[in-house]
Amino acid sequence: MPPAASPKIILGSSSQTRRTILKSMGYDFIVMTADIDESAIRREKPEELVMALAEAKAEAIIAKLGKNEHDYSETSPDQIILITADQIVVHEGTIREKPRNEEEARKFIQGYSRSPAITVGAVFVTNLSSGFKKGGVDRAEVYFHPIPEHVIDALILEGTVFYAAGGLLVEHPLVSPLVEAMVGSLDSVMGLPKDLTLSLIDEALQSTKSL
């Protein structure tokens, strides 16, 4: 549960899943998008890549806020927390982001019948008053039963897989019955680990009190 005096939250993400998770945590928030070219940011290590992307999203949104102060002027600055995040899937040692086409989506999903999908996600929290900035990384593993071709066909036809890292949709009603085991939390797999997010928000709020 969020603290009694909840801060104003800006969620820097277009992800409906992240919105749902943050809402379930009891926070009210507004949504802003970073609109960065994610393909221009590359790192070899999964943890470094997601952190670099989450930080870049924060920087882009802060730049927007500097030009559009009315977006957050209703709340005093010491109550405003910006949350950005990013996630990739690692499968058999290869980093997977959102599938670029049907062929890639099919290849991604077929592979999860063979070996686990490892999600690597970063959360980056910025206190817009104190200047506090800190991020963290969370990992989870998902093991699947064999995924039938008709399920893959349906997922591709629906199109949601093209907006998910690695085309991974564990919460989808066609996919969830095929999950054999999970190491880590469902919210982490879905892109916004609650425990990590709460911890970072708490640290951001404490940074204001120490000023």
Image (spheres, rainbow, N blue to C red):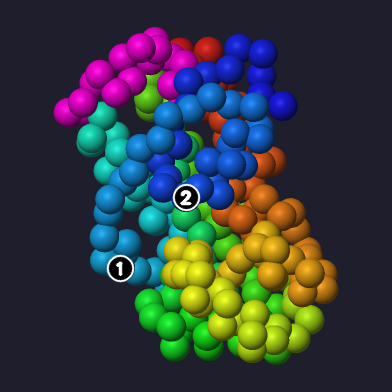
Relative to 163, residue 3 above or below = above
Image quadrant containing the N terminus: top right
Question: Can you say which quadrant of the picture contains the C terminus?
Answer: top left
Asked if one can make out residue 210 in the rendered structure from this viewpoint, the answer is no
**Label 1 with label 2: CB-CB less than 8 Å:** no
Cα distance between the residues tagged 1 and 2: 18 Å
* Residue occupying image coordinates x 65% and y 54%: 188
Q: Which residue is mark 1?
A: 39
In front: label 1 or label 2: 2
Viewer-proximal residue, 209 or 179? 179
Vertical comparison of 76 with 136: above or below: above
> Residue 99 occupies which quadrant of the picture?
bottom left
Q: Residue furthest right?
A: 180
- Label 2 belongs to which residue? 15
Provide the residue span drawn in magenta.
66-81
Residue type (three-letter) at the residue carrying disc 1: Ser
Task: Name the residue rendered at 40%, 12% in the picture.
Answer: 75
Residue 150 pos. (x, y %): 64, 85
Does residue 171 appear in this view? yes
Quarter occupied by residue 32: top left
Whether 69 is among the magenta residues is: yes
Q: Name the N-terminal-most of marks 1 and 2.
A: 2
Q: Residue at x 51, y 77 (%)?
A: 156
Return the x and y of residue 69 as percentages of the image width and height: 24, 21
Q: In terms of secondary structure, where does tag 1 sit?
A: helix
| Rendered image: mark on residue 115 | none
Q: Quadrant of residue 66?
A: top left
The crowd level at tag 2 (other Cα within 10 Å; few <14, some 14-19, many 20+) is some
Which element is circle 2 on?
Answer: loop
Q: Is residue 100 above or below residue 55?
A: below
Where residue 103 sits: x, y (%)?
Answer: 44, 88
